[in-house]
Amino acid sequence: MALHGDPAPVAARYVVTIERAASDSSRVKPHQHTWYFYREDQRVALLKGSVDEVWFRDAHQRVSFERVFHDDERVVDYSTGELATLHVIVDWVALSTFIDPSELAQLKLVSKQGKGKDTRLHFHGKVGQEVVTVDWLPALQLPQRLIRQVKGGHTVRMIMLENASRPLSNWPQVGLKSANYLHLDAADFGDMDYEPVVRKSEALDTRLGWRASHKHD
């Protein structure tokens, strides 16, 4: 199922369940979170509770990024230049749809339900080391359900609970809580090892493959 063009603005609330594999026969209690996803023409935001991830695109298609740490009251800014320095290749469509189009293309269409705006496509298959299951809503260009399973590892389940053309009044707003937070520039990380939030952001970068793993003194 090819994705094309810029998807229309949408807001969605997901329940996300993360199950980590137990090292023995004991059962590890799943962690459940509420994520809010907001898609606009020039901004895509994922609000995860304690951390917000916000991508921006300007009129010249230049993309920048900010990671908001609410517990630390800090915002880490990644300019277009810094993303390039980190060799981060940004696919706006992938950001806008929760799943990379190249991943969706590797999955097999198992079934189709509904018609028109109610159409739901069920995909399943393997992408790299992950077994991926997607219930795709073409009308919204978003997954209604997305499951990623790593053999012997963890399972992440995302289920859309509700959606609207814009965030509902009782949903968190992008930038409201963080309006007075201190901003840090990711390009200055080398001079800010003393900042706990720098280590947190570097750890997230490493997990995303943006930075090589290294230990601090």
Image (cartoon, helix red, strand yellow):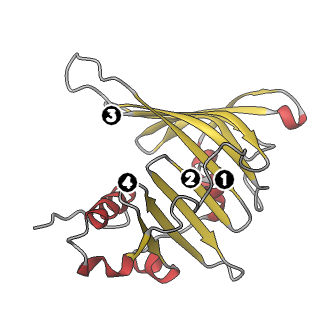
For the point 59% across and 53% down, which residue is it?
100
Mark 2, residue position: 46
How many residues crowd around disc 1 within 10 Å: few (fewer than 14), some, or many (20 or more)?
A: many
Answer above or below: position of 202 versus 82.
Answer: above
Q: Nearer the viewer, mark 4 or mark 1?
A: 4
Q: Which of these two is toward me, 156 or 201?
A: 201
Question: Looking at the picture, how far across and down is residue 176, in whole percent?
Answer: 58, 60
Mark 4: amino acid:
Asp
Mark 1, residue position: 38
In the rendered structure, find residue 153 and report the number of the disc placed on it: 3
Question: Looking at the picture, how far across and down is residue 40, in whole percent?
Answer: 72, 60
In the rendered structure, find residue 71 and report the number of the disc placed on it: 4
Q: Residue furthest front?
A: 180
How many residues crowd around disc 2 within 10 Å: few (fewer than 14), some, or many (20 or more)?
A: many
Circle nearer the N terminus (4, 3): 4
Answer above or below: position of 145 versus 184.
Answer: above
Mark 3: amino acid:
Gly
Circle nearer the N terminus (4, 2): 2
Query: Distance between the Cα atoms at labels 3 and 2?
Result: 24 Å
How many residues crowd around disc 3 within 10 Å: few (fewer than 14), some, or many (20 or more)?
A: few
